[in-house]
Image (tube, coloured by chain):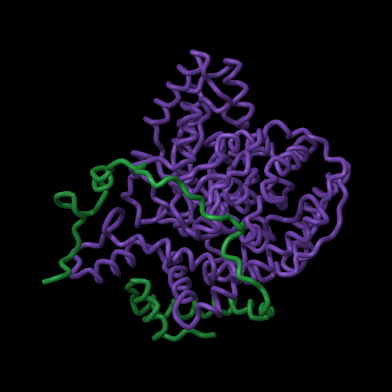
Chain colours: A green, B purple
Amino acid sequence: MSIELADVENIAHLARLHLSDAEKQEAAKSMSNILGLIDQMQSVDTANVEPLAHAFDAVQRLREDVVTETDHRDELQEIAPETEDGLFLVPKVIE
Amino acid sequence: MIDSGLAQISRALADGKVSSTELTQDYLKRIATENGDLNAYITVCEELALSQAKAADERRSKGEAGAFTGIPIAHKDLFCTQGIRTSCGSRMLDNFIAPYNASVVERFNAAGAVTLGKTNMDEFAMGSSNETSFYGPVKNPWDRSRVPGGSSGGSAAAVAARLCAGATATDTGGSIRQPASFTNITGLKPTYGRISRWGMVAFASSLDQAGTMTQSAEDAALMLNVMAGLDTRDSTSSDVPVENYSATLDRPLDGLKIGIPVQHFSEGLEPAVEQAIRDAIAEYEKMGATVKEVSLDNSHLSVSAYYVIAPAEASANLSRYDGVRYGYRCANPVDLEDMYKRTRSEGFGAEVKRRIMVGTYALSAGYYDAYYIKAQKIRRLIKNDFQKAFGEVDVIMGPTSPHTAFPIGSKNDDPVKMYLEDIYTIAVNLAGLPGISVPAGMVNGLPVGLQIVGRDFAEAQLLNVAHKFQQITDWHTQAPGK
């Protein structure tokens, strides 16, 4: 399986990455190599195998529906790039 | 004293032969001399360390000290530390000061441990050589032209060069065991879920596991005693009861059944490394263990499956780095999309971007079944192989890595070459099992590690098996020349 430049551009957009032309060329080459490695999986017939998402068959633990968290807004916003009046600021989305 | 192992230091503190303040000052002095060249620490927290040491000494004088009170350690720089930068080896988090402590850090603080600093690592733990760090490569203390392994290369080098008594680390595909092997230390990756992931910067959540890097198995037991246990803030934290891992180290090994996977002694394994591993296994036979071959039929597919599953999980986990709430943000974004894209492109290094791309591709429409579901099916086959083997044997042994530490810069031309570094370790993460790498010999002056893999939650047995080997060999006591 080889990856073309158009594929790289599409994936980069989905991943919200901006790649330079040189980076795109490099990505096409290295991703093709990596997919070559990954494609070795196709050598095994897994038609009747159940996928394993997680090493253990654990079930989600539940807890009482009570408030356990306290307000940490100020500490959390102290490390944010830009805030105002308790809000995170981003470039204008709606004119 | 600071050349001694953690357990010896613990005893010396208990006997009043040394104070935590003295130890901490000595380590800080050595770090000041050595770290410039080794680059094992990203951040050294002198002020915090000295105040924790003072508190530990006071606690001891009141008769309230535990086994870990006053012991100076280092944390891999992906465990959140309140008030101290947690960079994860990335420009993205170069300015990130966590507002809280990771569960692991909380536990060590409560035990009275001293935090000397935060150790270098591959960016977001993605790498096998510590060369992808934003803060530059770490040097191997055994040969400074070589890598210490990765991703926990800083923790490994810091323990090997005696710049701390022990270090925390994480292992997603081999990131504790392979650097332990390359630097002649003992590296334990416990069972998935044994130690809380809360406050650990996430890479691949179904594989990430915290563990220990120390001089010996006895030292590792002391660290695990602090770290292991249920934490409801981590939804996959296990409630399997915790043992006293120091209590069973000396159990005799008569009748222990050791499995040798044929696939881990095949092509690609350096002959001198194979010889060292076979010699180590022969020592176990002298102690009354029996050895038989086992087969892990699908182990050759573990790297392939891992490089779908881990990048897929990483691409989802790392979507949180958007320049909005914390971490790096690009300058003068023109709109939201420009901010996301430039923040991520400027904040992440090449290997992280590569893995995000691979993961995004594997999860994208049209490829999900062929890659992601297929990889999960292979993951089941790999787990089944181990279950079958553990029906016949108690532990599985083999080399941690097919060779010794390689020169810095020698494997950077093709990512696949670097990915194959973890050929013997990755399957263990996919199956969620505990594994340990133990110093087992030298080839041309470079360390060789023996990997021992156990059943789910068999950490006490693994440490017992490793400790008995360290009672009759002295590989683990060897330190690099200054």
> Could you say where residue B213 lies in the image, as x and y percent from the top left?
59, 43
Q: Is residue B109 visible?
A: yes
Task: Work out whether B143 lies above or below B72.
Answer: below
Quadrant assignment for the N terminus of chain B: top right
> Could you say where residue B187 lies in the image, as x and y percent from the top left?
63, 46
Quadrant assignment for the C terminus of chain B: top right
Depth check: give the residue in front, B201 or B273. Answer: B201
Depth check: give the residue in front, B258 or B186. Answer: B258
- Describe residue B15's horizontal placement relative to residue A72 as left or right: right
- Describe residue B71's horizontal placement relative to residue B177 as left or right: left
Which quadrant of the view contains residue A41? bottom right
In percent of the image, x 64 and y 39: which residue is there? Answer: B479
> Could you say where residue B66 lies in the image, as x and y percent from the top left?
56, 23
- Describe residue B244's horizontal placement relative to residue B472 as left or right: left
In percent of the image, x 63 and y 51: which residue is there? Answer: B177
Task: Work out whether B165 lies above or below B466.
Answer: above
> Could you say where residue B417 lies in the image, as x and y percent from the top left?
59, 69
Q: How many numbered discs sit on the rendered protein?
A: 0
In percent of the image, x 45 and y 70: which residue is there? Answer: B354
